[in-house]
Image (cartoon, rainbow, N blue to C red):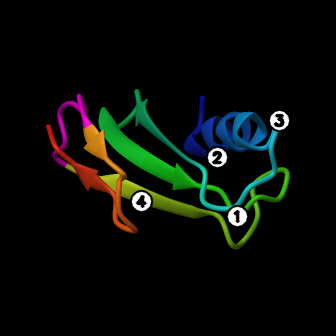
Amino acid sequence: MTLANALKYIAARLTATNDAAGEFAFFKYSATKDYFECISDGLAGVTAKDIVIGLVGATQINAIDHSSEELTILS
């Protein structure tokens, strides 16, 4: 599976029931073994305003803090 195909599946899930901008998902892409974060713009499908961040070097994500306007990976 390509990264583009993975993003299509993730974007579809993020907008399946609620089209809210700012919904996000962490995922590990097997070809690179790196984690990525996909932040949806709230529109169905992958669009130019969706954000994808490569978390190079992250080996696991166990906990996050999203209690303020910032997102922090705790471990």
Residue 8 image position (x, y, % from top left): 72, 42
For mark 1, give the secondary structure.
loop
Q: Which mark is residue 41?
A: 1
Name the residue located 16 percent from the left edge and 46 percent from the top edge.
57
Residue type for callout 1: Asp
Q: Which mark is residue 16?
A: 3
Q: Which of the two discs, 3 and 4, sits closer to the camera?
A: 3
Look at the image and say whether residue 64 sits in the magenta stretch.
no
Residue 40 image position (x, y, % from top left): 65, 56
For mark 4, give the secondary structure.
strand
Say whether disc 3 or disc 4 marks the residue closer to the N-terminus: 3
Say whether disc 4 or disc 1 marks the residue closer to the N-terminus: 1
Q: Which of the two discs, 2 and 4, sits closer to the camera?
A: 4
* 28 displayed left or right of 59: right
Look at mark 4 in the image and give the residue it sits on. Answer: 53
For mark 2, give the secondary structure.
helix
Residue 32 image position (x, y, % from top left): 34, 38
Callout 3 touching callout 1 (CB < 8 Å): no
Q: Quadrant of the C terminus?
A: top left
Name the residue located 16 percent from the left edge and 43 percent from the top edge.
74
- Neighbor class of circle 2 (other Cα within 10 Å; few <14, some 14-19, many 20+) is few
Q: CA distance from mark 3 to mark 2?
A: 18 Å
Look at mark 2 in the image and give the residue it sits on. Answer: 4
Query: Which of the two residues, 41 or 6, is positioned nearer the viewer here?
Result: 41
Q: Which of the two discs, 3 and 2, sits closer to the camera?
A: 3
Say whether disc 3 or disc 2 marks the residue closer to the N-terminus: 2
* 68 displayed left or right of 17: left
Residue type for callout 4: Ile
Q: CA distance from mark 2 to mark 1?
A: 16 Å
